[in-house]
Image (cartoon, rainbow, N blue to C red):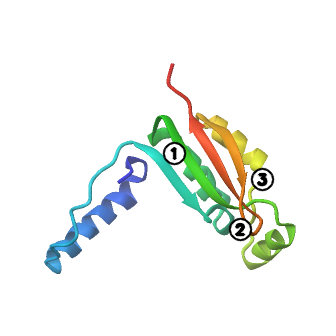
Amino acid sequence: FVPLFDLNLYLTSRSIEAHRQYHKLQNVKPSIYLDSCNLTVNINMMHISPLACTTGLFNGVGKILKPQGLLLTYGVFSNVDFDHSLRYRHPEWGLRDVSFLKTLGQENGLRLEEIVDMPANNKCLLFHKDSVV
């Protein structure tokens, strides 16, 4: 589990262990504490959550991603009608501008390396964490 979200994830870790013990689950391994990773994948989250979740994603990934690690995001980034419908449903939802995400990445040591067009107006954004010099 990621150390950046100590309270929630440690509680989650304890909860997993409590369920394992209570239900005597032999097919569920104990949760482990992860302090770094090579890859983080984020799918369809940024547009259906408050902006604070997106900034939290980039802040957290910038801290735990190993040098040369990757952040892969997938979602909708350019459909104006969809953006309006999201904001109508919840004022904190909406499409995130790619240039904003590029800047947010740079602020957290992540370089936008590639944008890949996907079906149905979706895109994959690939961010790369450069080596620590």
Give the Cα separation between the discs numbered 3 and 1: 19 Å
Q: Secondary structure at mark 1?
A: helix
Camera-nearest label, 2 or 3: 3
Q: Are marks 3 and 1 in contact (CB under 8 Å)?
A: no
Q: Position of residue 4 (x, y in %)?
A: 43, 48
Q: Secondary structure at mark 3?
A: loop
On residue 97, which mark appears? 3
Q: Choose top left, top right, bottom left or bottom right for residue 124.
A: bottom right
Residue at which label 2 appears = 93
Asked whether, in this view, residue 55 is left or right of residue 94, the answer is left
Give the Cα separation between the discs numbered 2 and 3: 12 Å
Give the Cα separation between the discs numbered 2 and 1: 21 Å
Q: Name the N-terminal-most of marks 3 and 1.
A: 1
Q: Secondary structure at mark 2?
A: loop
Q: Position of residue 72 (x, y in %)?
A: 58, 51
Residue located at (71% from left, 48% from top) = 115
Residue located at (22% from left, 70% from top) = 28
Q: Residues within 10 Å of mark 2 (few under 14, many from 20)?
A: many
On residue 61, which mark appears? 1
Residue located at (13% from left, 77% from top) = 24
